[in-house]
Amino acid sequence: MKVKSPSNVTRVAIVDDHTMMREGWRLFVENATDLAFAWVAGDASEAMRKVDEDTPDVLVVDISLPDRSGLELIKDLRLLRPKMPMIAISMHDEKLYAQRALKAGARGYVMKSAPQKDLEQALHRVAAGGIAVSEEMSEEILKAFSSGHSAEPKDSISELSDREFEVFVLIGQGKTTGQIAEALRISTKTVDVHKMNIRTKLGMNESGELAYFAIRWAEGQKTTSDRQK
């Protein structure tokens, strides 16, 4: 079901498990030009139900949700509502997740630390049928497209599922199992299962080997990002 809104107003819904972030988004949307607040959801299951009841003009999805990866939610909603534009949001640098988000079906990727004017521009852009990523990321994607190669490197890390990649990134940040569980709102046992699956895909036997590799990988990503600034 689609609730009608004035032609010049974009109805925005938000999926985020943090109460303060949800309220912040609500206030931001309500005070932004030509935007209207539709609803909020705290997890993927609630979001699926609410989208079915009231499809917004644009859906904003946090990548880290307690019941499922936000990217997996985007994939499912893309099949159910192919015309509904979605924007992925995260605390992580877009170089880590933007391409995964676009591949999943999002029309944009915005970091939570972005200025409000960037968030507003992104919402209007995807509502109009465009794609919202930074200029740097746009150039990287265009270069990969023009060269005929995927922008995402074909290595073992690219084989990780979206949730496994979230865990891998947090391992690279030096987070403990308990801290990862808290950050992703999942149990420590679930984190351990993800770690085991990651080790299998990366061909590693020991947890220490995974931690060392993830930290080195994260340092390499930071070095590459700093060089491009």
Image (tube, helix red, strand yellow):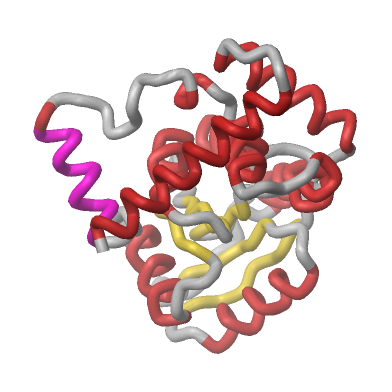
Q: Nearer the viewer, residue 154 or 119?
A: 154
Would residue 92 appear left or right of 178 to someone viewing this image? left
Q: Report which quarter residue 209 is drawn in.
A: top right
Query: Which residue is located at x 22 percent, y 46 percent?
Result: 140
Work out whether residue 89 can be spotted. yes
Which residue is at 73% across, 44% downward?
Answer: 44
Quadrant housing residue 105: top left
Residue 181: horizontal and vertical position, in percent? 82, 44
Q: Is residue 17 left or right of residue 124?
A: right
- Vertical placement of residue 61 versus 164, above or below: below
Who is closer to the viewer here, 53 or 13? 13
Secondary structure character of the magenta stretch overall: helix
Q: Is residue 25 above or below residue 228?
A: below
> What segment is highlighted magenta in the picture?
135-146
As drawn, 114 above or below 110: below
Q: Report the quarter where the C terminus lies.
A: bottom left
Taking the image as drawn, is residue 80 in sight?
no
Q: Residue 159 at x, y = what percent?
A: 50, 20
Residue at left offset 41%, top offset 52%: 222
Give the number of marks.
0
Which residue lies at the image location 33% right of the left edge and 64% below the top edge? 125
The picture places residue 11, in percent across and down from the top left corner, at: 54, 68
With 183 as the anchor, is 110 left or right in this view?
A: left
Q: Is residue 94 left or right of residue 182?
A: left
The image quarter in which residue 121 lies: bottom left
User: Percent from the top left, x then y, of residue 118?
Assistant: 39, 74
